[in-house]
Amino acid sequence: MRYGDGSMPSYIIWPLSWQEIEMSHELVKVLIDDDLEEIENPVWHLVDPTNAGGPATLCSGEFFGYGESQVEYELKVVARGGITCGWCMRDLKTLKSIRL
Ligand SMILES: [Zn+2]
């Protein structure tokens, strides 16, 4: 499904189990960016679960949704994997490498 900006979609996360939903993450594919440029070969970014400012990609912090911008995008929720953005993967690996 494709969404224009201005509202957040209510998506169906079935058929994930409750356990999978708890551990799931959200992905966004930006189709048209802030400058109204159509993205060639769009990739799936991780929606940064730590960004308190609103829905944003992990790698660039670009906001989408809630009328923040002109961005057009697709969203999906997955139990694991699915990130095809190399920058998001790099950032995620960097975070995971921090030992607690
Ligand atoms: Zn990314």
Image (cartoon, rainbow, N blue to C red):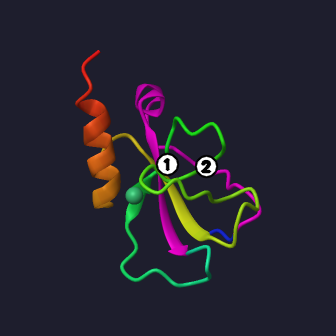
Residue lying farthest top?
A: 100
Q: Residue at x 47, y 57 (%)?
A: 60
- Residue range highlighted in magenta: 5-32
Which corner quadrant of the figure contains ligand 1? bottom left
Residue 23, can we see it? yes
Residue that appears at 54% across and 65% down: 74
- Relative to 45, say whether 40 is above or below: below
Where does residue 1 sit, x and y in percent of width and height?
A: 56, 68
Helix, strand or loop under label 2: loop
**Residue 45 % position (x, y):** 42, 57
Nearer the observer, 35 or 12: 35
Q: Which mark is drawn over residue 55?
A: 2
**Vertical placement of 78 versus 67: above or below?**
above
Q: Indicate whether residue 41 is drawn in magenta.
A: no
Q: Residues within 10 Å of mark 2 (few under 14, many from 20)?
A: many
- Up-down relation of residue 18 to residue 100 (above or below): below
Quarter of the image where the C terminus is located: top left
Looking at the image, tell me whether mark 2 or mark 1 is earlier in sequence order: 1
Considering only vertical position in the picture, is 22 above or below 44?
A: above
Residue 53 lies in quadrant: top right
Q: Which residue is mark 1?
A: 47
Rendered location of residue 9, percent (x, y): 67, 56
Q: Nearer the viewer, residue 83 or 19?
A: 83
